[in-house]
Image (cartoon, rainbow, N blue to C red):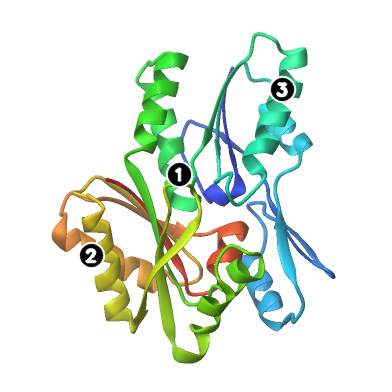
Amino acid sequence: MIKYVTDSSCDTIKYDDVSVEVAPLKIYTDEREFVDTSDMDVHEMLDYLLAYKNRSYTACPDTQSWLDAYEGGDEIYVVTMTSQLSGTYNSACTARDIYLETHPDAKFCIIDTLSTGPEMRLMMEKIIESKKAGDTFEEVEKKTKEYLAKTRLFFAFKSIHNLAQNGRVNKVVASLIGPLNISIIGTASTDGKVEPTSKCRGTKNVISKLIEDIKEAGFTGGKLRICHIENEKLATQVGDALKQHFPSLDLSIYPARGLCSYYGERGGIIIGCEC
């Protein structure tokens, strides 16, 4: 049996005839635990964290979550968030090794995307499409790794408090955003880290800068995915602006799940595209 598996930072993947298993990450405070499942109340989590004054943090899927997702598979394709900021990839590999002890003939393709969110979604879509086209396991693995070099991730965040609190970005940079009504524009670096690149004030400037960065990265049309953290308006505005440049744009806009909402924070958007 073919199994497609990802962690919950990939957000939502819907295919009419394909099931994608998801290993959930978790968001913690000293008082609460939020498990990033499809039915988690993201709005309630964001409200709670806004009022909560102490530290919050995240945890990668445990080994058993991966094993549950792998169960029954003999050809298993796994897409994980960046190993530079999470133990998710290593956890997936540990579970693979355990699974192989009782399923020695199983084949695994585990992709460390060095990214998160919409770029992960593009990778999973590529795997599924290649498999539907009749590609062998080896062909899918090769094409997916090649595709990874042709995708990029960008973001616009109104707050990077949680990123700074967990050591993902500089705390001084984070402190400059909220009080000044500034959005941080950034990307996933080539080594899989969060890389703020510029600051913008006002929606028009944010949209203009995102489009400039996406075009400079080499985007000429094709697939582009946007997840938003309770900011469908901005995501739609960015999508509409890009359609003016690229009329044949293959665009999907959707709400982020828990993990991307935690780090992107309310009002943020994350973009994955082919370049």
Work out how far the residue at label 3 is from the one at label 1, CA to CA, in angstroms: 25 Å
Is the residue 249 above or below the residue 203 in the image?
above
Going from N to C along the chain, the mark reached first, 2 or 3, is: 3
Residue 75 percent location from the top left of the image? 57, 18
Q: Which mark is residue 97?
A: 3
Give the labeled residue for mark 1: 121
Residues marked 2 and 1 touching at CB (< 8 Å): no
Secondary structure of the residue carrying tag 2 is helix
Quadrant of residue 202 within the rendered picture: bottom left
User: Is 124 on the left-hand or right-hand side of 95?
Assistant: left
Residue 11 percent location from the top left of the image? 53, 51
Going from N to C along the chain, the mark reached first, 3 or 1, is: 3
Of residues 229 and 80, the one drawn nearer to the viewer in this rendering:
80
Quadrant of residue 148 within the rendered picture: top left
Q: Residues within 10 Å of mark 2 (few under 14, many from 20)?
A: few
Going from N to C along the chain, the mark reached first, 2 or 1, is: 1
Work out how far the residue at label 2 is from the one at label 3, CA to CA, in angstroms: 43 Å
Q: Residues within 10 Å of mark 1 (few under 14, many from 20)?
A: many
Name the kind of residue labelled 1 in the image. Arg
- Residue sitting at the far bottom: 179
Of residues 120 and 192, the one drawn nearer to the viewer in this rendering:
192
